Amino acid sequence: MKFFIKTYGCQMNENDSEVARYYLEQEGYESAENENEADIVILNTCVVRKKAEDKFLSTIGELRKKNKKIGVMGCGAEKLKEDLFKRGVNFVIGTRAISRIPEAVELSIKGKKAAIFDDKLDEIDYRNILKRNSKHHAWITIIYGCNRFCTYCIVPYTRGREKSRKMEDILQEVKNLSLNGVREITYLGQNVDAYGKDLNDGTSLAKLLNETKNIENIERIWFLTSYPTDFSLDIAREIASSEKIAKSIHLPVQHGSNKILKKMNRRYTIEEYYELIKSIREIVPDASISSDIIVGFPDETEDDFQQTVKLVKEIKFERLNLAIYSPREGTIAWKYFEDNVPHAVKTRRMAYLLNLQKEVNKMLNESYLDKTVEVIVEERAKSGLFYGRDIRNKIIAFEGDESLIGKKILVKIKKTTAGPLYGDIIKII
């Protein structure tokens, strides 16, 4: 029988889909090119935002009309659990039970419902999961879950508490992938900086980066997502020590007002965040800092919003993910806070920040004009041009062909925008 996995949400879901595919193929199931060719369609879901949840629930209805066996994994499975059966789903797999997915599929084929939520993370054989969605890049989950319990966030309830993988297991996975053609890796965690703290043996993200940079054939190392109070300056020192480790740090701030940060249960002040950015830039002067900001959180006044505007102007983030606050069922904010910022005010503030960040991006990108940068080629864009990223996570587009994918090239920048940079290939390295 053929299966197809449709993935929503974050990079951790991408990695989880690769794990699920491995276990199903080990049991003889065949991966289909699309959902129409599949007998079984598995939705790897996200519920961080309501829009994401609505999207996969709508897809379930569409699949029922096509008489497909339907499975749900990911955060949507954890949030809705057996209630999904009422919508026509045949099996549900929790975020920590992926290795048992063949069992769930087999039960559904026999006409039985399956809901599996055991913690089987230690059983996942990452070292032998060599088939990835990219031939040259691999997502590698190093820590599961989150202990932070931000009041707006559902992740601790769907992903559980923090649980780190053993460092030797991760390093062996990277070595095996490097022998299989992978040249770039991204270490993943809902709070990647917390890696190793639960192991109580001195393991840390900084130590993992230090070991990884010595693995032959690995040319670039990324990591995300960071949390300000868990970010160690040892990580910044590792970045500064090696041309292999990307000079790109995604450090979500969420807001510029201490009042709102406290209400969000973010465990730092805005002054501490400023100081951290200053320290990082002292160690890695050309560090690319990106962030997330939520607009319209409960009780956000115009003064609170202006403090966020001040933050964006002063820090000058290379990239900024902006979201309008919407209550997520099950979170502390949903239970106890009134969603009292009018939608029109939220959208106005959002638009202002979008335009401001566009100006910041345009200004920062102009410094790239006529520079030659090292790029690892990723794929062809819809425009027909190919693109890749430099070590600071700048997206750079150029004329090319399929043979360049995964290769390192030198590109001279000839045009800048508020978004991608455009250039000509100077040399294939």
Image (cartoon, rainbow, N blue to C red):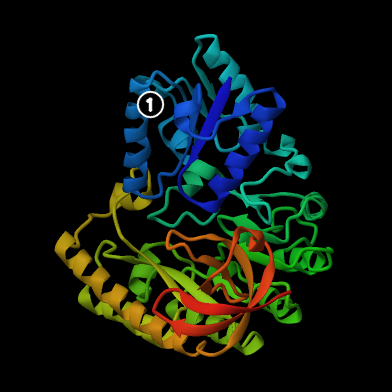
Q: Amino acid at mark 1?
A: Leu
Element at label 1: helix
Q: Residue at x 27, y 54 (%)?
A: 337
213 or 50, nearer to the observer: 213
Q: Residue 215, position in %: x, y? A: 83, 63
392 or 34, nearer to the observer: 34
69 or 254, nearer to the observer: 69
Structural crowding at the residue carrying mark 1, measured as other residues with C-alpha within 10 Å and reported as few (<14), some (14–19) or many (≥20): some
Q: Would residue 25 appear left or right of 385 to someone viewing this image?
A: right
Q: Is residue 266 visible?
A: yes
Q: Decide: is 71 above or below 427.
A: above
Q: Is residue 193 visible?
A: no
Q: Residue at x 76, y 56 (%)?
A: 200
The quadrant the N terminus occupies is top right
Q: Residue at x 53, y 44 (%)?
A: 159
The quadrant the C terminus occupies is bottom right
Task: Quickly name the residue at label 1.
Answer: 63
- The answer to which quarter of the image holds residue 244 is bottom right
Q: Residue 402, position in %: x, y? A: 61, 58
Q: Residue 369, position in %: x, y? A: 50, 89
Q: Residue 386, position in %: x, y? A: 53, 65
Q: Decide: is 319 above or below 117.
A: below
